[in-house]
Amino acid sequence: MKKLSYLLIIFGCLLVLAYCKKETSERFKLLTTPTWDADTLLADGVNAGGPGQFLEKFNGDAKFNDDGTGTFGYFTGTWTFVSEETIIKIVTDSLPIPLYCNIVELTTASLKITTSVINPDNISDLIDIRMTFHAK
């Protein structure tokens, strides 16, 4: 009887562990595995990633760590998937509000995202942003 009790306890523990183990999605793995290098940073269809330009601080590497932290060009912060992994929410102390980026493409070699932000020169106007990255 004692052996049966131990066996039931072990089986119960294994069942709980198996149930609690979080499965990572394919999109999660695609986003977090490589370091992403910025290809193009466009604002309203115009290159805006160079020195002194609107997206200058996003130029460089982006790394989405599997613990939800990351670096995004010159920014550091946190990220999460939203809306069934079709949107990336980026939060950083360097930006006044979270940045919600629509995932246009996510493969082993390419990440393409879009978003819109308020134009700091005219707050009634939005700037359409498109950023593309390739895996290093």
Image (cartoon, rainbow, N blue to C red):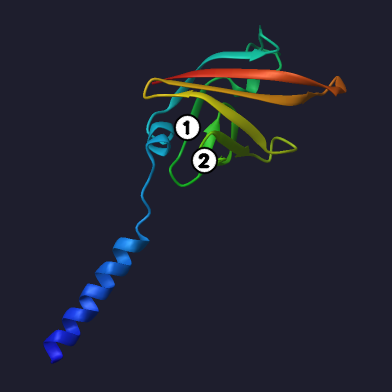
Residue denoted by label 2: 84
Above or below, 130 against 35 in this view is above
Q: Position of residue 36 (x, y in %)?
A: 45, 24
Contact, mark 1 vs mark 2 (Cβ under 8 Å): no
> Which secondary structure lies at badge 1?
strand
Residue beneath the point at 67% across and 9% down: 45
Above or below, 133 against 8 in this view is above
Residue 76 shows which numbered tag?
Answer: none
Q: Position of residue 53 (x, y in %)?
A: 70, 13
Write down the quadrant of residue 75 in the picture: top right
In the rendered structure, which disc, 1 or 2, sits on the residue that comes first in sequence? Answer: 1
Q: Position of residue 8 (x, y in %)?
A: 21, 80
Q: Is residue 107 left or right of residue 86?
A: left
Q: Position of residue 134 (x, y in %)?
A: 44, 18
Residue beneath the point at 64% across and 39% down: 92
Type of the residue with mark 2 = Glu
Residue 63 shows which numbered tag?
Answer: 1
Q: CA distance from mark 1 to mark 2?
A: 21 Å
The quadrant of the picture occupied by the N terminus is: bottom left
Badge 1: residue crowd in 10 Å (few <14, some 14–19, many ≥20): some
Work out whether residue 86 can be spotted. yes
The quadrant of the picture occupied by the C terminus is: top left
Type of the residue with mark 1 = Lys
